């Protein structure tokens, strides 16, 4: 069986292909539905299906993982994503695609929950930021390449779905070389053994560390699910949007590892305050230059460099605060926070551009980042356990 290092690379490869499928699905379906005349508010609501699936699955994952281990959860989640992707071309119906989005959300949540917990449980305190940065790096790489698949719509509408499913199957098969492991037992940890009490304890200890995950979910879903609609309405074409959207994820790829290493050295909270400040400024500038292709390329990339690592920083920050026995619960709550942000973002964005069509929808993003920044500044840093 594979060594610990080989296992690590297999896990982050799975995260990468998951990012690829998510990065493809959001703009691809947004563009298809917009071209079919679906209202922006409905389009935005439809995009929440992925994250509703994440929320549906979240309360039911911890006990099976403690009983059966990390590998079965990851394997089943990956298989669910693959099957769902292959079913999209079967029937072009709004409700059917919504169900498939939810199934992909459930599968992705299983995959991410398993990989996050496995990596954070086996990483040392000194290397945790770096290891989770690799996690974010590979997800970002996948997310960067995913939107490029929208260009295949000009060839055939089914091609992006089937190609993504094939790539996912190839990477998923790497799990065969990985030996299963189990999370740390919490019976003698001094923390609650009931699920509800663990959620309460985790929330009390680490709620501030969950905010960046919420922010990243809000950003990811809004930029991929609503910006294509908004971009088409302010005069940009599909081919150009397919190149602009990945710039945010590309920026995150450039900074994931440096920010992870810096957070190991200078502290997660200090890095978060700095990147949130810079990201807020970037999106504020976008409101003035959103009709300029060059400005969008530059500012999306810069924004990705600064706030594209919010999710991985959130995981690392939470792992600093929580005892290892609460890490599975913490990772579930990170996924829930991410999902709530992902549901909130597209819906607010869709409603915003419908009610205020002449006002830049990027103000929604600026307001969200500013709120998290102010909260992080004024919340006293928790003492690591």
Image (cartoon, rainbow, N blue to C red):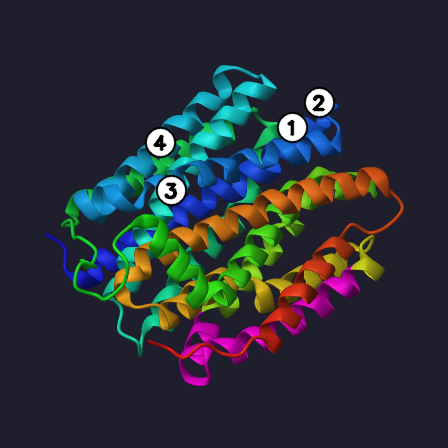
Of labels 4 and 3, earlier in sequence is 3
Q: CA distance from mark 3 to mark 2?
A: 36 Å
Q: Magenta includes 271? A: yes
Element under label 1?
Answer: helix
Residue on which disc 3 sits: 59
The magenta region covers 257-286
Of labels 4 and 1, earlier in sequence is 1
Q: CA distance from mark 4 to mark 2?
A: 27 Å
Residue on which disc 1 sits: 32
Overall secondary structure of the magenta section: helix
Of labels 4 and 2, earlier in sequence is 2
Disc 2 to disc 1: CB gap under 8 Å: yes
Name the spot of residue 289 as percent of width and height, x first: 82, 59
Name the spot of residue 182 as percent of width and height, x first: 17, 53
- Residue 12 shows in this picture: no
Place residue 331 in its image quadrant: bottom left
**Which label lies toward us, 3 or 2?**
3
Q: CA distance from mark 4 to mark 1?
A: 23 Å
Element under label 2?
Answer: loop
**Which label lies toward us, 4 or 2?**
4
Element under label 3?
Answer: helix
């Amino acid at each position: 069986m594979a060594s610990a290092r080989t296992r690590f690379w297999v896990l982050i490869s799975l995260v990468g292909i998951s990012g690829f499928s998510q990065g493809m699905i959001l703009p691809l379906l947004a563009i298809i539905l917009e071209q079919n005349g679906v209202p922006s508010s409905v389009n935005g609501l439809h995009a929440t299906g992925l994250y509703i699936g994440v929320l549906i699955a979240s309360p039911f994952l911890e006990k099976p993982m403690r009983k059966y281990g990390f590998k079965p959860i990851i394997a089943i989640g990956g298989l669910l994503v693959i099957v769902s992707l292959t079913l999209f071309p079967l029937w072009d119906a709004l409700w059917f695609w919504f169900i498939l989005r939810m199934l992909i959300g459930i599968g992705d949540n299983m995959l991410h929950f398993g990989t996050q917990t496995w990596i954070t449980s086996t990483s040392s305190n000194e290397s945790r930021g770096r290891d989770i940065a690799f996690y974010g790096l590979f997800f970002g790489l996948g997310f960067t390449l995913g939107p490029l698949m929208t260009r295949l719509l000009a060839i055939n509408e089914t091609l992006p779905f089937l190609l993504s499913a094939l790539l996912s199957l190839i990477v998923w098969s790497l799990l065969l070389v990985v030996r299963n492991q189990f999370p740390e037992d919490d019976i003698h940890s001094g923390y609650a053994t009931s699920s509800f009490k663990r959620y309460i304890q985790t929330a009390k200890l680490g709620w501030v560390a969950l905010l960046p995950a919420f922010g990243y979910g809000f950003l990811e879903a809004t930029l991929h699910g609503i910006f294509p609609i908004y971009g088409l309405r302010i005069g940009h074409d599909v081919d150009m949007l397919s190149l602009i959207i990945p710039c945010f994820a590309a920026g995150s790829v450039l900074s994931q590892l440096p920010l992870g290493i810096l957070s190991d050295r200078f502290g997660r909270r200090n890095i978060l305050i700095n990147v949130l400040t810079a990201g807020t400024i970037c999106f504020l500038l976008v409101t003035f230059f959103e009709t300029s292709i060059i400005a969008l390329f530059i500012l999306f990339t810069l924004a990705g460099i600064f706030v594209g690592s919010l999710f991985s920083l959130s995981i690392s920050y939470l792992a600093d605060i929580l005892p290892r026995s609460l890490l599975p619960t913490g990772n579930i709550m990170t996924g829930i926070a991410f999902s709530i942000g992902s549901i909130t973002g597209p819906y607010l964005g869709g409603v915003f551009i419908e009610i205020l069509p002449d006002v830049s929808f990027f103000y929604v993003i600026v307001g969200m980042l500013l709120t998290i920044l102010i909260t992080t500044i004024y919340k006293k840093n928790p003492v690591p356990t």
